[in-house]
Image (cartoon, coloured by chain):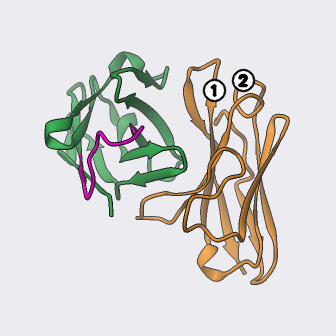
Chain colours: A orange, B green
Amino acid sequence: QSVLTQPPSASGTPGQRVTISCSGSSSNIGSNYVFWYQHLPGTAPKLLIYRSNQRPSGVPDRFSGSRSGTSASLAISGLRSEDEADYYCAAWDDSLSGRVFGGGTKLTVL
Amino acid sequence: QVQLQESGPGLVKPSQTLSLTCTVSGGSINSGSYYWSWIRQPAGKGLEWIGRMFASGSTNYNPSLKSRVTISVDTSKNQFSLKLSSVTAADTAVYYCALSSSGVEYWGQGTLVTVSS
């Protein structure tokens, strides 16, 4: 059972906008930045969002992050087939004094 | 282009110590405000944070692994390492190393470690 809760799956058609949620608590998302990762099997996870809503250099602006209270979201607009991957949220947890990940969301592009 | 590569035994016996090394190329491991992390992913499961080390020498470890984990760095070799003692089958996973700073992260491709007799 992950400290951060994500839906196990999400889907959309090319061009659509999809949103993936990440629910936590006051000790993690409620008081610390959220990070989002894209992970394709057999490859290194890729940082998509840091500090809850910032994109690293090279990440398309189709990807955006937001945080409200103890929840966060990753939005992907203009969905493309290459976006099909697993997506993870992560945050520091003050109670655990450690970083916690969500269980991951498998995104399918129909 | 900074690249990371994990290396170490792919098979470890139960109760022994898992030892992995992450070699950084294309940049200095000690530049900027980087910190060094280890993360793992058991088959069919999500990512699990193991711990991190800062250039100052301070460390943070996953509470569930803290008693068994040590992360260290050898700046002369541009490497950092993970040691996990008293392993069991539950420690079988793909292990990733990562180099992070604000807005910048580099990950290795991961290495599978199987715990079995």
Tell me if residue A7 comes above or below residue B54 in the rendering: below
Tell me if residue A41 comes above or below residue A81 in the rendering: above
Tell me where residue A72 appears, x and y as whole percent: 78, 45
The residue tagged with tag 1: helix, strand or loop? Answer: strand
Looking at the image, residue B51 sits to the left or right of residue A16; the answer is left
Q: Does the magenta stretch include residue B24?
A: yes
Please, what is the three-letter code of the amino acid marked with disc 2?
Answer: Ser
Quadrant of the snapshot with the N terminus of chain A: top right
For image coordinates 53% across by 44% down, the residue present is B102
Q: What stretch is highlighted in magenta?
A: B23-36
Sequence-first disc among 1 and 2: 2
Name the residue beneath numbered marker 2: A27
Please, what is the three-letter code of the amino acid marked with disc 1?
Answer: Asp
- Asked whether A98 or B94 is in front, the reply is A98
Chain letter for the residue marked with disc 2 in the picture: A
Packing grade of label 2 (10 A; few <14, some 14-19, many >=20) is some
Q: Is residue A68 visible?
A: yes
Name the residue beneath numbered marker 1: A93
